[in-house]
Every structure is written in structure tokens, then in C-alpha cells.
Image (cartoon, helix red, strand yellow):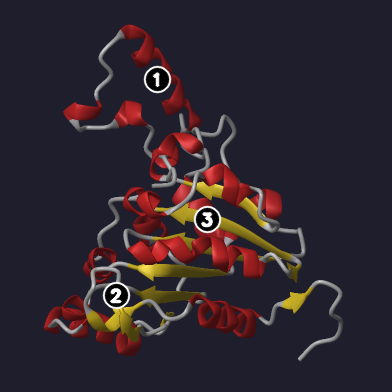
């Protein structure tokens, strides 16, 4: 099995991310996220396709569970137009964890963890999920797992991505590409949750899944919409231009 991503791939930055530092870069800002679904393996393909477009900047937000399906994150940073990767521990350093299993076990580790908490120290300092919301022109979540779908509709904000969504400017779009087992997709609670996004929350666009053989071996609806179709949707929605392409549509 090839190596997969780890939170340690991207250490906590020493300098806080500020949206204002990128406000005049003349680029379309795409915040691309993945959650804990095997369809996260499509992220490199989506990024490679988007790398061909000009004047865009992509930042990535990954839930911890999505990392199992991604390559080492430094590989994604080598793809053109990818300008940053943001993880849970960048907003909540490990030294702040309330989980006893994550409590430092020796003084040297404690000192290292304390240093990680220093990115925010006073009122007025940048808060990552707010800065990402300010920076982004659009948020695309591909894939969106059943768990994250339920948390979004329930208003949860217990990781970085969910905090971005909870603090989102509803004048801008969030597009989601659900991906889950067929029976999970067809479950009545999923139907209700998708209805909220499609009919009550006008800032959401649901890129509904397709029918195919799923990773679990079942066959039916629930697979993430083809990654190339997801790319085409965002290209058309944001009117992206290929490198060297001129004029407007």
C-alpha cells in the first residue's frame, strides 16, 4: 500500500495566514476540501486539471479522516496553483487537545506543543477559519462524506472545515459532491439533509452522486460525481480561463 498523508506532513505555520495579504492578487480563490470518503483519492486529479488554468489560487482543507486516501501532502503542494494546505491542528494545535490520548508525555514534547499554540495569542490576531472564509471566492467539498453532510446540516463546527462552513458568507457559493455507500445515500435522513442544502440554503450547490460499482463492492448510486465533471462545473461557474486564453464568455 502506498504511503498516505499525515497531519505531520504540514507542520503548524509559524506565521498566521491572513486573507488581506492576498486580497489584491487578481486571482480567483478556490478553497477545495475533502472529507473522509475513499473518493478523496480523486483530489490529485482535480488539482492537476485545475493547474492548467490561469489566475487562480487554490488552498486545500482536509479533514483528518480524509488523509488516509491522499498521498503525502508535500506532493500536492508541488502542483501548480496550489498555494497552501490547512489542517485541523493549524487551528487547534495538539497542545490544546482535551483528548488524554494526545496529551504530551514528556517535558520536551510539552515544550514543542506549547510552541504550536503560539500562533494565536490575543484579540485581533487572525483566526484561521475566518481568514479562509474571507479569502475564498468559492468552497468546493469533493468528496462530502455522509458524516460531514450530517454535521453541516446540524450546524456542527468541530473541525477546521466545518468551522469555515459555519462562518461562511452566504453571498458566496459552497458546492458539495456527496460520496457514500448506496444505502447511506438512499437513507431517509440523507434525503432530508440534502433537501435542506438544495431548497433551504441557497448558497449551496449539490453535485449529486452517480451510479457505479462502489469501493465497498456494492453497485448503485452514491459514488461521487466524476471528478472531470466536478472540474467542469467549477470552471464554468467561476469562468476560469486556460493558460494563454484571452477574452471573456
Q: CA distance from mark 1 to mark 2?
A: 43 Å
Q: Which residue is mark 2?
A: 214
Quadrant in the rendering for residue 39 = bottom left
Residue at 33% in and 26% down: 95
Residue at 34% in and 30% down: 94
Q: Which residue is mark 1?
A: 114
Q: CA distance from mark 3 to mark 2?
A: 25 Å
* Callout in the foreground (1, 3): 3
Quadrant in the rendering for residue 164 = bottom left
With respect to residue 106, does 16 lie above or below? below
Q: CB under 8 Å between callouts 1 and 3?
A: no
Q: Specify which label sits upstream in the sequence, 1 or 2.
A: 1
With respect to residue 53, does 86 lie above or below? above
Q: Which residue is mark 3?
A: 60
Residue 135 position, x and y percent, is 59, 59
Residue at 44% in and 61% down: 41
Amino acid at each position: 500500500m502506498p504511503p498516505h498523508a499525515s497531519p505531520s506532513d504540514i507542520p503548524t505555520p509559524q506565521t498566521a495566514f491572513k486573507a488581506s495579504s492576498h486580497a489584491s492578487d487578481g486571482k480567483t480563490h478556490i478553497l477545495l476540501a475533502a472529507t473522509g470518503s475513499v473518493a478523496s483519492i480523486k483530489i490529485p486529479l482535480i488539482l492537476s486539471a485545475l493547474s492548467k488554468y490561469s489566475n487562480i489560487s487554490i488552498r486545500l482543507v482536509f479533514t483528518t479522516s480524509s488523509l488516509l486516501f491522499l498521498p503525502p501532502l508535500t506532493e500536492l503542494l508541488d502542483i501548480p496553483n496550489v498555494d497552501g494546505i490547512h489542517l485541523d491542528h493549524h487551528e487547534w494545535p495538539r497542545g490544546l487537545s482535551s483528548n488524554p490520548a494526545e496529551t504530551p508525555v514528556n517535558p520536551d514534547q510539552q515544550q514543542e506543543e506549547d510552541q504550536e499554540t503560539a500562533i494565536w495569542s490575543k484579540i485581533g490576531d487572525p483566526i484561521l477559519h475566518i481568514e479562509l472564509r474571507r479569502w475564498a471566492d468559492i468552497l468546493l467539498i469533493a468528496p462530502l462524506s455522509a458524516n460531514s453532510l450530517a454535521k453541516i446540516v446540524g450546524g456542527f463546527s468541530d473541525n477546521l472545515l466545518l468551522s469555515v462552513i459555519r462562518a461562511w458568507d452566504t453571498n458566496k457559493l459552497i458546492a458539495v459532491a456527496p460520496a457514500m455507500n448506496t444505502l447511506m445515500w438512499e437513507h431517509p435522513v440523507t434525503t432530508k439533509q440534502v433537501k435542506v442544502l438544495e431548497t433551504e440554503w441557497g448558497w449551496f450547490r449539490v453535485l449529486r452522486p452517480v451510479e457505479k460499482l462502489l469501493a465497498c463492492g456494492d453497485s448503485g448510486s452514491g459514488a461521487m460525481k466524476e471528478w472531470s465533471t466536478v472540474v467542469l462545473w467549477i470552471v464554468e461557474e467561476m469562468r476560469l480561463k486556460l493558460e494563454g486564453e484571452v477574452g471573456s464568455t
